[in-house]
Image: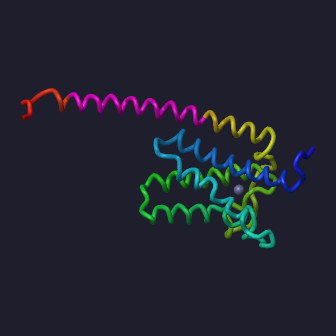
Amino acid sequence: MSLLGPALDHLAYLLFAVATHAAVGYALVVAFTDRPPRAGVVGAVLPDVDLLFPLAWAFPLNHRGLTHTLAFAAAVVALVAAARRPRWSAGAAALGLSSHLLVDSFTKSGVAWLYPLTTERVGVAASIHSGWGAALLWGVVALGIVVGRRSTDATESAGGAVEAEAQDASETPGTPRR
Ligand SMILES: [Zn+2]
């Protein structure tokens, strides 16, 4: 059943897929690090920049081509590291980029992980971006965010306690100032 017509359906599918990647990147950084998730989100979305390439372009410059390879991911991470961003942003970008390749491996067309060494596409013929696959993935994302929030809260309150102690220590002794 198509409510919107095939072209709009496809656009909606693509937007949903990109949103899914962003959410996975966000959840991963939040769940496994205590760093801001921005670089993870950008890394997780970046491979789909190939959706903007002209449709006439052929592999490796089509969708799920060059930008969906380990080589591309490594190059981006190296660039981020070279740009002297804080070290964790390269790590977060790596997390996001690899999550994208992994998620897209659960699609019919799969991903040519090792291009240019080989053009062989690796994947499980599933439909991670729609139906049950997407529902499952978003469930895991939600879980990751909840777990990440909890550990951040714990860290923040522990940090807050330490700060308060430090403040007490600096205030207690000494001669009153004039
Ligand atoms: Zn993709």
Number of numbered discs: 0
Colouring method of the image:
rainbow
Looking at the image, is 172 positioned above or below residue 41? above
Q: In the rendered view, would you say 85 is above or below 178?
A: below
Image side of residue 159 versus residue 98, left or right: left
Q: Say whether residue 63 is left or right of residue 21.
A: right
Residue 63 position, x and y percent, is 75, 63
Question: Farthest residue toward the right?
Answer: 1
Residue 87 position within the rendered picture, expressed as x and y whole percent measured from the top left? 43, 55
Q: For ligand 1, which image quadrant applies?
A: bottom right
What span is colored magenta in the figure?
144-168
- Residue 2 position within the rendered picture, expressed as x and y whole percent measured from the top left: 91, 46
Residue drawn at the location 80% of the way across and 68% of the way down: 55
Q: Where in the figure is residue 3, as x and y percent of width and height? A: 89, 45
Whether 97 is among the magenta residues is: no
Q: Residue furthest front?
A: 178
Residue that appears at 52% across and 41% down? 32
Q: Nearer the viewer, residue 117 or 163?
A: 163
Identified at 66% across, 52% down, the residue is: 100
**Quadrant containing the N terminus in the rendered view:** top right
Residue 158 is covered by the magenta coloring = yes
**Quadrant holding the C terminus:** top left
- The one nearer the camera, 120 or 156, is 156
Q: Main secondary structure of the magenta part?
A: helix
Q: Residue at x 63, y 35 (%)?
A: 142
* Above or below for 147 versus 119: above
